[in-house]
Image: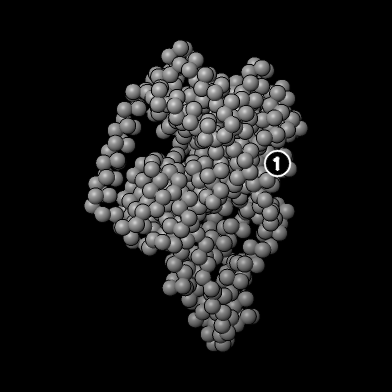
Amino acid sequence: MKTFTGIPASPGVAVGRVLVYAEDEIPEIPRYSITKAEVSSEWERLQKALAVAVSELTVLYEQAGREMNREQADIFQAHLLMLEDVDFHDQLKERLKKSLQNIDWVVWDTCGEMRRKLMESPDPIFRERAVDITDVSRRVISRLLPAAYSRSSLAELNEDVILVAHDLMPSDTLTMDKSRVKGIALDEGSGTCHTAILARAFNIPAVLGLSLISREVKNGEMIALNGSTGTVTVDPDRQTLDLQENQKKIHSKQIDELSVLRELPAETIDGRRVTLKANIGLPEEAEGVLHYGAEGIGLYRSEFLFIAPGRHAGEETQFLAYSKVLKTMGKLPVTIRTVDLGGDKVIPAFQAANEKNPLLGWRAIRLSLANPELFKVQLRAILCAGVSGNVRIMFPMISGIEEVEQARALLDEARAECKKKGQPCAEDIETGVMIEIPSAAMTADILAEKSDFFSIGTNDLIQYSVAVDRGNEKVGYLGESHHPAVLRFLKRTIDAAHEKGIKAAMCGELAGDTSATALLLGLGLDEFSMTASSIPRIKKIIRSTSLKSCQKLAAECLNGRSIAEIRASVQRWMADNAPS
Ligand code: PEP
Ligand code: MG
């Protein structure tokens, strides 16, 4: 028995067999010469591989049509069309005859060339097709060389597993078979990285930042994972298994108890009412958030629409996704954040070449403003969907007032375009900015003049305040929400909002962190938006405390000189005020 300790990233307990997922296992493709006489047998080999690939994709396409959204089914259809494309076949045959190389190599080389040409195109739609080519060529090669190519697909699991990997792309997390993945353990990552956020959204226990776990465990080994304490035990003994089983029961009992709070307001005992909302990444999540008593969506991470492999979500697809969320939420407000791609959420269509510091690079609003036509597609889709509900728009990674002005001007253009086409669209939409860069927090008073609300993105605000990559487990310990600098940025932002008469919300993970609730209340935060399942826990704290005591705590913390001092104040407060 061996125990690893990492970052508790998504609560819950899971016990099961390991599946080690190696993301990018591209085998060495053999290359050898063939004779003219061997051309026909090589061609036949390809036909067989194609037939298997086509039947696999047909099953996936039909399954996706039943179980996923249209967008995901479309991906498989596009792959099928490519495999059956006559020009593609002609190209392969021609090259096979001319080069007299084995067919595996011909497929790999031809697809590689197609991929390179697409990547050079200025048109993002073409560039993202490159991902489809990679997917399709891998599928065919895996059928031509089954022994060499053993890459497992997370979308097609036929038994329950605990997924162990070095790291996962958001697309892996989005497309994996969530009914089969019972737990996630990663070498990389932190509590605020996107795998953690998605794992919490899907209620999958996860422990991240485990450094070497993917090298230490083997496929099929038994492990017990506790996403609440951050431990992973390999080959657990009876005692450990009993302990985990017990914790599992406690966890589900707590969930049942907290659901009683659903209908009650988030109000302190001395009458301070705040709003608790949910963060979502997929339209399908909207329904579930109502179960936890969310009073709206405080952050809809729209970029996840684009991260599904190989797709560019066009205006219609976006419109349908946004309408679905708005209709589900009825009159409750839905805050759609315009795409925050780039940084750690890269798609080929918007891949900045070789950025040395992607987190400081071409991401979020910078990318949208650099691609105004694509940005307006999103804005039009939001405006048109807005007629079905109560929509708000939020711009990510704002660094200064110019970006807000440009974004708002494009919103006006998008509205005018909808009207010109006679499309009904929402009027008087509130537009807000995310405060997640120190320069935005420092100029919050200026930004407030052009904003209807603020939403503080603490995941990034902390990362940029203390210069720590939020996905890097080696420096993760420095990414401290209770750093005096972070508290000062929060105070400044909330005060600036209130001075201009607008609300200050928070949609970073800190909003759902029970150790920060009292402090945030004391600082004057109006709205907390978090993973829906955290809402009852936060509400319980709010309902059992007084604003007055929180304000006292906030004042004490603002005087704190170090993280340790601030944490000690919070600990004392919690010991004195813990809800029964
Ligand atoms: C944040 O930075 O706090 C935030 C909510 O945005 P994201 O986590 O998607 O970067
Ligand atoms: Mg952010």
**Residue at the spot of label 1:** 366
Is residue 102 positioned above or below 331 on the image? below
Q: x, y percentage for residue 343?
A: 62, 47
Residue at 59 percent of width and 26 percent of height:
559
Apparent side of residue 283 relative to residue 228 in the rendered image (left or right): right
Look at the image and tell me in which quarter the C terminus lies: top left
Residue at 54 percent of width and 51 percent of height:
474
Quarter where residue 420 is shown:
top right
The residue furthest top is 270
Which residue is more in the foreground, 99 or 211?
Answer: 211
Is residue 164 positioned above or below 147 on the image? above
Apparent side of residue 242 relative to residue 285 in the rendered image (left or right): left
Which residue is more in the foreground, 170 or 517?
Answer: 517
The mark total stands at 1
Q: Is mark 1 within 8 Å of ligand 2?
A: no
Is residue 7 positioned above or below 212 on the image? above
- Residue type beneath disc 1: Arg
Q: Regarding mark 1 in the picture, which secondary structure is present there? A: helix
Q: x, y percentage for residue 102?
A: 55, 79
Whether residue 566 is visible to the viewer of this picture, yes or no, is yes
Which residue is more in the foreground, 419 or 433?
Answer: 433
Residue at 44 percent of width and 49 percent of height:
6
Q: x, y percentage for residue 448?
A: 69, 23
Neighbourhood count class around disc 1 (C-alpha, 10 Å): few under 14, some 14–19, many 20 upward: some
Apparent side of residue 395 relative to residue 18 in the rendered image (left or right): right
Quarter where residue 377 is shown:
top right
Residue at 34 percent of width and 44 percent of height:
13
Quarter where residue 223 is shown:
bottom left
Look at the image and tell me in which quarter the N terminus lies: bottom left
Q: x, y percentage for residue 146?
A: 44, 71
